[in-house]
Amino acid sequence: MEISIKRGSLRTHKTACIAVGVLAGKRLSPSALRLDKASRGALTRIVRRGDISGNPGEALMVPDVGGIAAERVLLVGCGKADGISGLEYLGALNAAAKALCGAGLRNAVTALGEISVKDRDTAWKQQQIAVSLNHAAYRFERLKSKPSRKPALTRAWSAVEDSDADAASRGLRTGNAIALGMALTRDLANLPGNHCTPTHLAETAEALASAYPSLEVTVLDEADMLKLGMGSLLSVARGSRQPPKLITVEYRGAGDAPPVVLVGKGVTFDSGGISIKPAAAMDEMKFDMTGAASVLGVMKAVAELGLEINVVGVAPATENLPDGSATKPGDVVTSMSGQTIEVLNTDAEGRLILCDALTYSARFKPDVVIDIATLTGACVIALGSHASGLLSNHDALADDLLAAGQRAGDRAWRLPLWDEYHKQLESPFADVANVGGREAGTITAACFLSRFTKDFHWAHLDIAGTAWTGGKTKGSTGRPVPLLMEYLLGRLAQ
């Protein structure tokens, strides 16, 4: 979607809808007051009737408001006039975007950038406007023989004052780039396993490099991984006819500075292997490559913005299927680091591919390494769909990621990584077992990964609960692209 700045009078702007704020106490925002004056008090009468109170998250569509050129006005609850929190503002934006996109409108104007948000500036607000509108307008219909005929929101403007124009332009540009990255992540994750194979992920990375000369892509195949000793990663691929890939995307925007390395789990379909999953909802295991998809989405956004930072994306990609040659429970494999692993459960495969990718990441001499994975069902039980799990061997890195998530509205929650949990991974036959029992499953999974990250600052994001939604609204959320981009932007600001 194209989103740009709108200056001048809203009253005379011809559009399908204008979104304006209603504040707590049934008060109108400045733009709403101007439209109200042009309509001879029509909006005031609606608000006084109590049709909308002004609480964040409310939205009311009003057609045919007299005295203005727009076909409709969307009244959006925006809370207290003296300022609302960033999360309240995101709630208001999401409600507005959902209403605009759900109404089948082709274009719209939003004046919600004028709402006062505590500790947030104009650029941040405009960034979130672009992200929320694009997120709500997203559709995935490429596999349908007859796509929906309902009109889609394809053009939007954000009304700003002249004094805010430069900051607003920066914010919209950043938000549009993040939205592009989220859309790529969602497109890849929403594809079924027979379309999005490890090879398809590699081809997508190569297409990104063709579109953005600042990106350099390297794809390792099975023979390359054998030479490197990636026995853990390859043990997962043994049951599949799809060849595994190790995809690296490098972006150098800051000379020789140590890069941020992002490692994304890319299991393009996870049956559980020999430790096969229950049939119910197994179709959702196509989303098990969202970590890799989010890494590619971030790389696209970074290249789109031309950030002065070095970022490397690493995506180990494979399927996990049962086969006569598949890894069996009790097998012992040797990782690239030389550590041996007793595979007690083949459905704990994400950590087996990540550990070799994390060892491989050391060659980039990283400043920090962050892995992203739909790793454990235990994280869904612990945190639900609201927050990603965060574990780290470096407090400053963890704090920065938590702050970035809070700022982006894509939150994480830190869990402990104490030595006591490591005892659950002890094995009588190998250096480490790949599972530690039912208790603290998210933590012991991260403890396993931490054994391969002792030489650098590292954080782990478990996105099993946040990467997609199920049921009637099933689909990828695009998370944690907003969190990761906010973290990278924060590093630049520092």
Image (cartoon, rainbow, N blue to C red):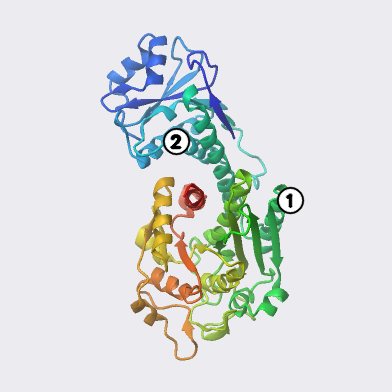
Which quarter shows the N terminus? top right
The outermost residue toward the bottom is 428
Q: Is residue 272 above or below residue 11?
A: below
Q: Is residue 320 above or below residue 197?
A: below
Along the viewing direction, whichever of 195 and 136 lies nearer the viewer: 136
C-alpha distance separating marks 2 and 1: 32 Å
Residue 73 image offset from top left, x and y in percent:
44, 21
* Labelled pair 2, 1 in contact (Cβ < 8 Å): no
Name which quarter of the figure residue 231 lies in.
Answer: bottom right
- Between disc 2 and disc 1, whose residue precedes? 2
Q: Is residue 264 above or below residue 450?
A: above
Q: Residues within 10 Å of mark 2 (few under 14, many from 20)?
A: many
Q: Say which element carries label 2.
A: helix
Name which quarter of the figure residue 412 lies in.
Answer: bottom left
Q: Is residue 88 above or below residue 402?
A: above
Q: Residue shown at 48%/30% (left/top)?
A: 100
Q: Looking at the image, can residue 22 be seen?
A: yes
Residue 373 image offset from top left, x and y in percent:
50, 63
Residue 391 image offset from top left, x and y in percent:
41, 65
Q: Is residue 326 left or right of residue 37?
A: right
The three-letter code of the residue at mark 2 reads Lys
Q: Residue shown at 53%/83% (left/top)?
A: 339
Q: Residues within 10 Å of mark 1 (few under 14, many from 20)?
A: few
Circle 2 residue: 125
Residue 471 image offset from top left, x and y in percent:
46, 51
Q: Residue shown at 44%/30% (left/top)?
A: 113
Along the viewing direction, whichever of 418 and 152 lies nearer the viewer: 418
The outermost residue toward the front is 256
Q: Looking at the image, can residue 283 be seen?
A: no
The three-letter code of the residue at mark 1 reads Ser
Q: Is residue 385 left or right of residue 165?
A: left
Tell me, for residue 210, which label it has, or none. Answer: 1
